[in-house]
Amino acid sequence: MASALKNLSAYDAATIPDAGDLAFGIVVAEWNAHITHALYEGCYDTLLKHGAKPENIYTVQVPGSFELPAGARILHGQHKLDAVICLGCVIKGETSHNEYINNAVAQGLTSLSIATGSPFIFGVLTPNDEQQALDRAGGQHGNKGVEAAVTAIRMAALKKNPDQEKRKIGF
């Protein structure tokens, strides 16, 4: 669903597993810091809201979104983490640089997830302009950092407890 039709921060809190025994990494791009730091605040606060302990949340900053996969891999290697959340913002601008960066980050995080068996969460805004980014970093469309935290909790819980209630999937 297009974010223009949905608030990114809207979710059913009752369906989120308790994060009290989980450890998280958060990697934040410094480029577009006024946006990425707003994403971080939404992410961090959401982890705490669902029981994560501050001492089990590890944060590093990297220069830009392109460096998110490398930063995530380094952080994952330094701590025993249940999920790593990567937060960045790549605004389209006048060239197609955004396509190269966004694809590289998405592929890098997917590769890390598959190679390690741990969730690496893509919390990167890919807007056409700064206003769209602001709208998704605490503005009228909520905060993508909240969405990334919720995704990390769900995926970490899935990894930690694969014997959860079996659900039929559309067949």
Image (cartoon, rainbow, N blue to C red):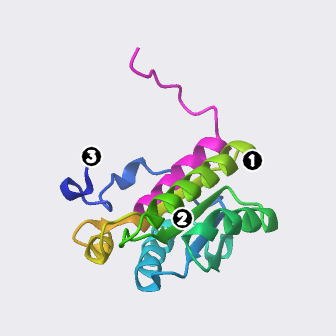
Residue position marked by numbered label 1 in the rendering: 116
- Residue 10 figure quarter: bottom left
- Residue 75 figure quarter: bottom right
| Segment colored magenta | 146-171
Tell me the residue at 44%/22% (across/down).
169
Mark 1 or mark 3, earlier in chain: 3
Answer left or right for 70 relative to 122: right
Residue type, mark 1 in image: Thr
Helix, strand or loop at label 1? It is helix
Residue position marked by numbered label 2 in the rendering: 51
Residue position marked by numbered label 3 in the rendering: 1
Residue 149 visible, this orientation: no
Tell me the residue at 61%/54% (across/down).
109
Residue type, mark 3 in image: Met
Q: Where is residue 3 in the image (x, y as percent from the top left)?
A: 26, 56
Tell me the residue at 47%/60% (across/down).
148
Residue type, mark 2 in image: Gly
Tell me the residue at 48%/75% (across/down).
40
Disc 2 to disc 1, C-alpha distance: 25 Å
Residue 126 visible, this orientation: yes
Task: Return the residue found at the far front.
Answer: 95
